[in-house]
Each structure stands twice: as structure tokens, then as C-alpha cells.
Amino acid sequence: MNGFRCSRQDWLQARHALAAAQLEVRLLRIERLCKRYDPNQPRVPAGSSGGGRWTGGGGGSGTPRTEYAQLRPRKLPSGYRVIGGRAHPVTPAQEARLDVTAAQARALVGAVQQRDPSWKPRPSLYEGVEGQILANQSEAQQATARLRELGAQERSSRPMQDYLLSDGKPIGSRNRRARTDVRTISKSEFDELLESISPGAQLISSPQAYQGNWFRRTDGSIFGIRRSEHNGITFEVIENKHPQIGPGYKVHKR
């Protein structure tokens, strides 16, 4: 009777295969837990009836447009963003692209849903920071195509100062030690500012030392989104022809 002999190499390969299988099972369990949260699921905006509640994105004629919920831990270290339920390290340039592409998608999807409340963009399969940026761009493109199908014109670009001044006065508040052209607004106000000012804006080259990215608007003005060491994500005017809202004008997100 021939005995079964197992070499050391065979034994090591078997152990490796077992460990790999156990790791695969753990990853599948984690993936299932992450899928319980859908970062693309819309919810009713704050300040509206039922604000903050999850929604399927449809709603009746009285339902305000939906906005995308973002999972953000209360204390997430600077330089990290939550994508698909997991915290990912991001560069300042990626943060700028994440915020601007998300704002563009929200603005365009909102414009479609004002005319077709039941419309929703097709969900995208994505992973990681660059995947989320691509997903945002895909939603913006789908919304643009739907607007054209509806015979609606894309929102025309208004001068930058129209969004940064309210009745001729700068938006937000001025911190005690800040310059007069440095303002601070809430997170929701910052998101609304980007939704208003970023549609149609294109990514352009910026100085290598700039901690973010520059974007050129259709009217020729340029703004930057960067990570400030002491003030977090900051909107910055790079080029604009207005006496009050000129280069160096900044808006911090509180």
C-alpha cells in the first residue's frame, strides 16, 4: 500500500491557499457591511419639510429637489474623505476635484429633477477617491444629456460676484483678525456656493505649490479650491474683474 507523502513545499502552498481563502471571506463580510450605506442615496435638503430624511429621489410635485448624502465621521483627520463607507487619504488636489465635481453633479441633477422629479442618474460602480470623482462626472454628464432631451437650456453662468455678494455686502462673516476680503460661511452655505459657481467650470493647470486646484468658469473668471493649513477647505478667487471680488478674495468653510 503506497503511503501519501507531502513535501514541505506542498504543505506551505496548502497553508497559503487556506489563509487566502480566509482573507477572502473576511473581505466579503466587510464589503457586505459597507454596502448597507449607499453614498449616492439622496435625501431631502435641510430646511425643507422632512429635511435630512432619506428619499428614493422621486417624490411628488411638492417635494424639493434631493441632494446627495455624504457619510462623514464627526472627527475625520484632515486629508481624509469617506468614500463608500471607508476613510481614504486624499491629496489637496483630489479634495478640490471631489468637491467641485460633486457640486456640479448636484446642481445638474437638481435642475433635471425640477422638470422631471422622478429622474435619477444611473448608479456607477466605483472604488476609491478617483472612482468617486469619475462617478460624479458621470452623473453630471447624464443630467446634462437629460436636460437636452427635455429641451431645457443649461444654466447660464453669472458673474462670480453675484454669488459672493448679497445686496452688495460680502456673504458670511469676518473673523476678528481676518482681512476684509476673507469670509467664513457654514458647510451648507459652502456647498450651495459651489453648486452655484462651479457648473461649467473646467479644471486648469495651477502652480505646483498650490494646495488644491484651479477651475476656469465659462465667463473667464478663475477660482481655486485648496486646503488651508489653519482653515480647512477654502474657496479662493484667482482671477475676476470686480473691485470688491478680486484675486485673493477667500471664503473658508466653517
Image (cartoon, rainbow, N blue to C red):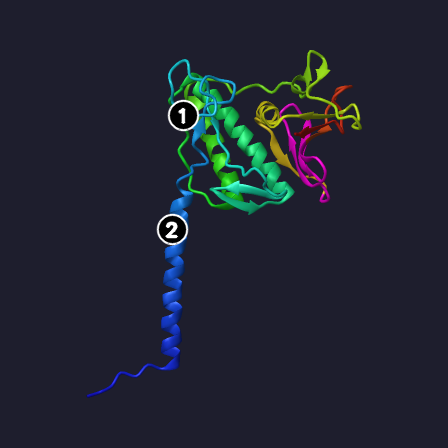
Left or right of 141: which side holds 249?
Answer: right
Element class at badge 2: helix
Question: Which residue is situated farthest in the front direction here?
Answer: 74
Is disc 2 surrounded by few (<14), some (14 to 19) or many (20+) residues within 10 Å? few
Q: Position of residue 253 (x, y in %)?
A: 65, 30
Q: Which mark is residue 57?
A: 1
Q: What residue is disc 2 on?
A: 29
Q: Position of residue 128 (x, y in %)?
A: 50, 45
Mark 2: amino acid: Arg
Point out the image quarter for the N terminus: bottom left
Q: Position of residue 103 (x, y in %)?
A: 55, 29
Look at 58% across and 25% down and name the residue there: 188
As rendered, which of 9 and 134 lies closer to the eye?
Answer: 9
Q: Position of residue 24 (x, y in %)?
A: 38, 57
Left or right of 190: which side holds 39?
Answer: left
What span is colored magenta in the figure?
A: 208-234
**Residue 112 quadrant:** top left
Q: Which mark is residue 246?
A: none
**Mark count:** 2
